[in-house]
Image: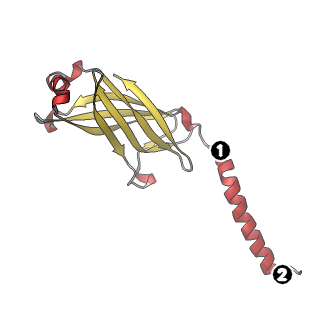
Amino acid sequence: MVLGSRKIVLIGAIAAVAAAIILVPYIQSLSAPDINRVTVRVMSVKLDSAHSTSQNLQLQVTFTIDNPTNQSVTTSSINYAVAANDIPVGNGNLSYEDVPVNGRPAIFAASSQNLTSSFSLQYSDSIASIFNKIQADPSSIRWHVTGDAVIATALTEIDRPFDSTI
């Protein structure tokens, strides 16, 4: 069997593609930042009085993402649950999933980025007492926020759980 130049080129191209498929994850693991060091915490939960009504409170939940690595990362979503004075009041989501990667918030190397999410709290009889306390004096509330954020680099994406009390 004689190998012509076309067959050699075809075999070489197939070998190059196979090598790339095998080596890209390995190369990424060598050069990737340790994104497990990226942390998410809640900085504040504030009442947005201008957009609140007697039956619906608008809260502004501000997250801080700390990136101690030497490469930039981004986030596609933050899913979270909010409790006020240990009473669960609802779930929220801050999503950038429909935004192209280059338009998502950049968390640059060795820096932090604040991201704010609007959280709507609807009045119900089951949370009436805490709803009224939030409405009267939001600064007296002890907030507990848990959840997870999807942190991504160019080739890696992980879920980073968080648990903050303020």
First along the sequence among labels 2 and 1: 2
Q: Name the quarter where the C terminus is drawn.
A: top left
Q: Residue furthest front?
A: 126
Left or right position of 125 against 156: left
128 or 70, which is in the foreground? Answer: 128
Q: Residue furthest top?
A: 140
Instruction: Where is residue 48? Give x, y as percent.
Output: 19, 34
Which secondary structure lies at badge 2? loop
Q: Which residue is mark 1?
A: 29
Taking the spot 53% from the left edge, 32% from the top edge, the residue there is 68
- Kindly identify the amino acid type of the residue bearing the numbered disc 2: Gly
Instruction: Where is residue 63? Give x, y as percent.
Output: 37, 33
Compared with 54, 95 (above or below) is below
Taking the spot 15% from the left edge, 38% from the top edge, the residue there is 51
Which secondary structure lies at badge 1? helix
Left or right position of 68 against 95: right
Pointer 2: residues within 10 angstroms few (<14), some, or many (20+)? few
C-alpha span from label 2 to label 1: 38 Å
Q: Which mark is residue 134?
A: none
123 or 100, which is in the foreground? Answer: 123
Pointer 1: residues within 10 angstroms few (<14), some, or many (20+)? few
Compared with 34, 142 (above or below) is above
Compared with 43, 117 (above or below) is below
Instruction: Where is residue 46? Give x, y as percent.
Output: 24, 29
- Kindly identify the amino acid type of the residue bearing the numbered disc 1: Ser
Left or right position of 128 against 17: left
Q: Which residue is mark 2?
A: 4
Left or right position of 159 against 58: right
Q: Name the quarter where the N terminus is drawn.
A: bottom right
Asked which quadrant contains residue 80, the reply is: top left
Instruction: Where is residue 27? Give x, y as percent.
Output: 68, 49
Taking the spot 16% from the left edge, 33% from the top edge, the residue there is 124
